[in-house]
Amino acid sequence: MMYYLLYWGVKSGKFKESDLIDILVRARQHNVRSSITGALIYCQGTFIQLLGGPELEVRRLFDSISRDERLAALDVVSQGNISQRHFDSWAMKYGEIDQETIAKLEDYPISDVSKYLKNAPAIRLLSLMGRLGIPNADDAGKPIEP
Ligand SMILES: Cc1cc2nc3c(=O)[nH]c(=O)nc-3n(C[C@H](O)[C@H](O)[C@H](O)COP(=O)(O)O)c2cc1C
C-alpha cells in the first residue's frame, strides 16, 4: 500500500524562479532515496504537487516542505492510501504552465489562476496533471505543451 498527498502552495517573497532548479535537483536526489515519486506543477506563483510513496516518507517530506520559507501558504488538498502510484516513472516530474493553458485545458474562463487552483477539487487537479505531457525533471524550465 502506498500513500499519496496532493497539496496546493503559493510562493513567498523569498522564492526566486531560479529556485525551481535547486528544488528539482534536491527532489531528484532525496526522493529517489526515500522512494518518493510525483509531479510538481508551477503556475504563475502557485504550486500543485503530488507526492507518493511510503506514508512515513511522504509525511516527512511534506513536513519539510511546510517549513520551507519559499512558500507563503500551503494546504493539503487530498491525502490517503492508494494501491498504485501516479507518475511512478520519475522522482519528480515537473512542468510549468500558465493561466491561459489551464483555461484552455479546462475549457473554462479563468480570471485568477491562483484562486482557481486553490479551490479546485483534487479530482480536477489530478486530471489536469494527467492531461499535461509533463516532462522529466531534466527538462525543468521548459514550458508544457498540452
Ligand atoms: C514547491 C516545493 C516543492 C518541493 N518539493 C520537494 C521534493 O519533492 N523533494 C525534496 O526533497 N524537497 C522538496 N522541496 C524542498 C523542501 O522544502 C526542503 O527544502 C528540502 O526537503 C530540505 O529540507 P530539510 O532542510 O528539512 O532537510 C520542495 C520545496 C518547494 C518550495
Image: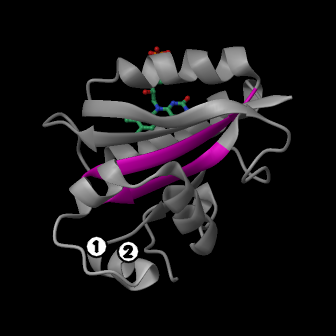
Q: Residue at image x 60%, y 60%?
A: 138
Is 88 placed above or below 131 here?
above
- Residue 39 among those drawn in magenta: yes
> Amino acid under label 1?
Gln
**Magenta span main SS:** strand
Where disc 2 sits, the SS reads helix
Q: Residue at image x 33%, y 40%?
A: 9
Q: Which residues are magenta?
A: 38-53
Please identify the quadrant where the N terminus is shown.
top right
**Residue 14 placed where, x, y %?**
18, 33
Q: Residue at image x 80%, y 31%?
A: 2
**Residue 20 placed where, x, y %?**
39, 47
> Can the viewer see residue 99 in this picture?
yes
**Residue 33 placed where, x, y %?**
75, 26
Asked if the residues shown at circle 2 and circle 1 are in contact, with their CB atoms under 8 angstroms apart, the answer is yes
Residue 25, picture quadrant: top right
Camera-side residue: 79 or 56?
Answer: 79
Where disc 1 sits, the SS reads helix
- The disc at residue 99 is 1
Is 118 placed above or below 105 here?
above
Q: Residue at image x 64%, y 45%?
A: 38
The residue at label 2 has a CB less than 8 Å from ligand 1: no
> Can the viewer see residue 139 in this picture?
no
**Residue 40 placed where, x, y %?**
51, 50
- The disc at residue 25 is none
Residue 3 falls left or right of residue 75: right
Is 80 placed above or below 59 here?
below
Residue 26 falls left or right of residue 74: right
According to the picture, the residue beneath numbered tag 2 turns out to be 102
Q: Around disc 2, counting alpha carbons within 10 Å, would you say few (fewer than 14), some (14 to 19), or many (20 or more)?
A: many
